[in-house]
Image (spheres, rainbow, N blue to C red):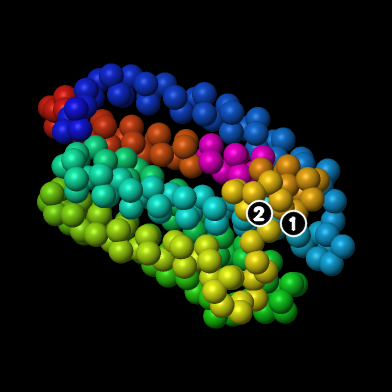
Amino acid sequence: MFNSFELNKIFAITSKAPKYVLFLLIVVLTIGLTEALVLSPEDYKQSDAVRIMYVHVPAAWLSLGIFLSLALLSVGSFIFKNKNFGLIAKSLAPSGFVFNIIALVTGSIWGKPTWGTWWAWDARITSMLILALFYGMYLLAWRIYEDKEQVIKVTSLIAILGVVNVPIIKFSVDWWNTLHQPASINILSINTAIHTSMLIPLGIMTAAFALFSLLIFLMKYNTELIKVKNKGLDRL
């Protein structure tokens, strides 16, 4: 079961899904932007600059989550020798890289009015930059290597090595003195330092970003499936 899949059945589902995901994305993003830009209050210290949070934080969360998925898929690829895991990881990586760059850019924009500087070699900022480099190496490897067996091994190794950086990003604010404040949201606890008037739009924008990531993944994955199908294969 882990060594092959029925291409036509998978493609029949994934080829129809993007239009539904796009519809949901438009609805959720419209609600999220309205909440974030109009209905949510200003911060008593940062004023309207806090609204950058509704883009910066979801982008950072998604970039971390996607890279963690790349690593898990890479481990699965090694264990089960399933080429489809590599194909799924390859299709996920572009949106993760885009979110990583968005997080770095919006973080820089947010840092100027908040910290008085566009950039600082803060532990979290630096580790996020390192994550972007791992994303870059991962995507570049798919372009450099032509042999599929070799590229899956190389990209899997990059993802598995790079995932060590994920907990460093997460806990950097606890392990070192950084410009970033400690985590305001703990998924393992009902307590949060963010008021619901800001937490709700943050959640909606995160859902919108996740839908966007899913849409990009489906488009990329469908393209990869078509390439496989054009080679005259019905299984990986």
| Residue 125 visible, this angle | no
Vertical position of residue 203 compared to residue 160: above or below: above
Residue at 55% over, 56% down = 60
- Region rendered in magenta: 204-212
| The magenta stretch spans residue 74 | no
Percent x, y of residue 114: 74, 72
Q: Which of marks 1 and 2 is nearer the N terminus?
A: 2
Q: Is residue 163 left or right of residue 187?
A: left
Let me know if residue 209 is in the magenta part: yes
User: In the structure shown, which secondary structural element does the residue marked by tag 2 occupy?
Assistant: loop
Answer above or below: position of 191 versus 144.
above
Give the x, y percent position of residue 188: 59, 48
Disc 2 target residue: 185
Amino acid type, residue under disc 1 in the picture: Ala
Provide the residue designation for mark 1: 193
Circles 1 and 2, Cβ within 8 Å, touching? The answer is yes
- The residue positioned 25% from the left and 20% from the top of the image is 8
Overall secondary structure of the magenta section? helix
Q: As shown in the figure, which amino acid type bears the numbered disc 2?
A: Ile
Q: In this view, does 57 lie above or below 179?
A: above
Report the number of numbered marks: 2
Q: Where is residue 112 in the image (x, y as percent from the top left)?
A: 70, 74
Residue 166 lies left or right of residue 90; in this view the side is: right
Q: Return the x and y of residue 68 as percentages of the image width and height.
A: 40, 52
For image coordinates 18% across by 54% down, the residue present is 153
Task: Report how far apart the C-alphas of labels 1 and 2 lie in the structure.
Answer: 7 Å
Rate crowding at label 1 as few (under 14), some (14 to 19) or many (20 or more) other CA atoms within 10 Å.
few
**Relative to residue 178, is residue 162 depicted above or below?**
above
- Identity of the residue drawn at 58% across and 64% down: 105
